Amino acid sequence: MKTPRRITVLLAEDHTVVREGLRRLLEVESDIEVVGEAANGRQAVALARKCRPAVIVMDIAMPLLNGLEATRQILRALPGAKILILSAHSDDAYVERAKALGAAGYLIKQTSARFLSAAIREVHKGKTFCSPAVERCFRPRLRETLDRQGRPRTPAARLSAREREVLQLIAEGEATTQIAAGLGISVKTVEKHRDHLMRKLDIHDTASLTRYALAAGIIEGGVRLTIV
């Protein structure tokens, strides 16, 4: 009798202890196999392209590239991928943004242990799965807040993928030269992206860009992210 193929999973979570705990939780499941682990959003995009996992468990608050932007890039490159958001954020704005980007489900970290394996199986089948606290946000609603591509009608939605990356790195305190080196572009190009950001968002200084990134959930408050 042929053994059923296991569901391949990529874990994208910046905190090592949490990521290891998730892996151990899934290792006991006979039908699930963790094939990759990413500590930031940029790694998640690269590993998704390389490993082509059936399901990607994605944290939102990660450095270099946040989980929502990583979700956008992965689904653009791999439209058939199933992304399950695993986040400490339960705000409607985060959940609705994840849904608009194409996430297949949304779990709150505080309750993830009970649901993670079941959620992976359900999204792998093409269904949606959410923690009870945010399930209402995955019901069809608020279409008037989305554009024709299913994107939120917000200033951030007008930014290009590269501009969102630059915004996150600016908000994380990276210098222009560091951003240029990290993204493999010139300092002049980084400055051009910064100018575009300020014009599109009607923001005119770095401190205000950082406050905007915090308010928009692009970075978390309270700590500098080292883990878009």
Image (cartoon, rainbow, N blue to C red):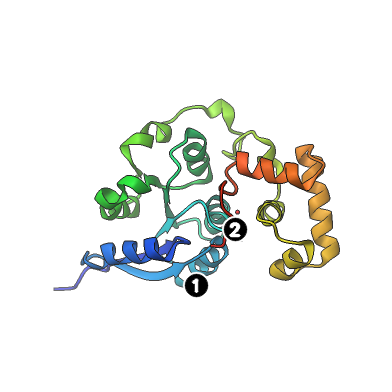
Q: Secondary structure at mark 1?
A: helix
Label 2 environment density (alpha carbons within 10 Å; few <14, some 14–19, many ≥20)? many
The outermost residue toward the right is 188
Using the image, determine if residue 40 lies above or below residue 138: below
Label 1 environment density (alpha carbons within 10 Å; few <14, some 14–19, many ≥20)? few
Q: Position of residue 123 (x, y in %)?
A: 34, 51
Which residue occupies 57% across, 64% down?
A: 42
Using the image, determine if residue 120 lies above or below residue 204: below
Give left or right: position of 151 versus 126: right
Residue 97 circle label: none
Q: Nearer the viewer, mark 1 or mark 2?
A: 2
Using the rendered image of the protein, determine whether residue 54 is visible from the camera's viewpoint.
no
Q: Quadrant of the N terminus?
A: bottom left
Residue at which label 1 appears: 50
Q: Gap between marks 1 and 2, in whole Å?
A: 18 Å
Which residue occupies 61% across, 35% down?
A: 148
Q: Quadrant of residue 203?
A: top right
Q: Quadrant of residue 41?
A: bottom right
Q: Position of residue 133 (x, y in %)?
A: 35, 35
Which residue occupies 61% across, 61% down?
A: 64
Which residue occupies 60% across, 47% down?
A: 218
Give amino acid for label 2. Answer: Leu
Q: Quadrant of the C terminus?
A: bottom right
Using the rendered image of the protein, determine whether residue 58 is visible from the camera's viewpoint.
yes
Using the image, determine if residue 48 lies above or below residue 166: below
Using the image, determine if residue 81 lies above or below residue 2: above
Residue 65 circle label: 2
Give left or right: position of 216 versus 55: right
Give amino acid for label 1. Answer: Lys
Q: Position of residue 186 (x, y in %)?
A: 81, 67
Give left or right: position of 178 versus 59: right
